[in-house]
Image: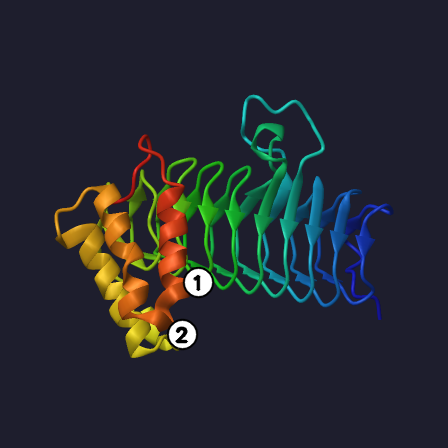
Amino acid sequence: MSLIHPTAMVDPKAELDSTVTVGPYTVIGPNVKIGAGTRIASHCVVEGHTTIGRDNRIFQFVSLGSDNQDKKYKGEPCELVIGDRNTIREYSTYHIGTVQGGGVTRLGNDNWLMAYTHLAHDCLVGNHCTFANNTQLAGHVVVGDWVILGGFTVSHQFVRIGAHSMTAMCSLLFGDLPPFVMCQGQPAEARSMNFEGLRRRGFSPERISAVKAMHKALYRDGLTMEQSQAQIATLTERYPEAAPDVALMQDFLSQTTPQRGIIR
């Protein structure tokens, strides 16, 4: 029995693995590539230069790979690239990139993306992220691994969201959110670190202590950004096991511009 419903419209030029499932009334364009085991439900549109990996589950009424909403876009062959084992729920919209932003909107692996999520052009999302309902990312937003964005979180364009961070419901991000930080508000303010999430992911007590020390340096000691970075750099002496976590924070802060700043 064919895995493509007879009412689906799949362009003959599209490249679908023989194990891909396509539901009723879904439309798939000529420049689409879809890997093994991916299931696409009914009434979806997958168009543009879109590549989808293995074992994804895409629910009904999702739009992937349509033209971006940048007025500078002139029809260039930009891309949307989706990795493996992602779950994309109803009414989500993910657009292709722009030439000015590198040409690719990219979603990594093992992400859980709830209904009405939006990835604008040139967004780069890592692995193992959870986006709750109505999470909206403007163009050029970069999201690290293991990020949790609460429902109705909205991010300004060019914002970076660090690995292991978390937002509360209805958070509005105008600045970069450093790794491990939990924030809430409109505009968002830092509230704590994502300690429970780190414990669930197997962080040792020493690594969590290092994260607490980074939080203190960034938010509680009244230091400038430069002073905070210098303080954080010394933490590997006290917490050698946390060297990768300290390096992650140092790398993130080194890329933060004065114009954007971090969420305080």
- Around disc 1, counting alpha carbons within 10 Å, would you say few (fewer than 14), some (14 to 19), or many (20 or more)? many
Please provide percent x and percent y for residue 71.
55, 22
- Around disc 2, counting alpha carbons within 10 Å, would you say few (fewer than 14), some (14 to 19), or many (20 or more)? few
State which quarter of the image contains the C terminus: top left
Residue nearest the observer in this picture, 42 or 244: 244
Check if mark 2's residue and mark 1's residue have beta carbons within 8 Å. Answer: yes
Q: Secondary structure at mark 2?
A: loop
Q: Secondary structure at mark 1?
A: loop
Residue type indicated by callout 2:
Arg
Q: Residue furthest front?
A: 237
Corner quadrant of residue 249: bottom left
Residue type indicated by callout 1:
Trp
**Any part of residue 186 in sight:** no
Please provide percent x and percent y for residue 69.
54, 30
Please provide percent x and percent y for residue 91.
52, 50
**Any part of residue 108 in sight:** yes
- Return the mark for residue 15: none
Residue at 83% over, 66% down? 2
Distance in Å between CA atoms under marks 2 and 1: 9 Å
Q: Which residue is mark 2?
A: 201
Residue at 38% over, 37% down? 156
**Is 109 positioned to the left or the right of 20 in the image?**
left
Q: Which residue is mark 1?
A: 146
State which quarter of the image contains the N terminus: bottom right
Residue at 36% over, 40% down? 256
Instruction: Tell me which label, 2 or 1, sits earlier in the chain.
Output: 1
Number of numbered discs: 2
Residue nearest the observer in this picture, 92 or 208: 208
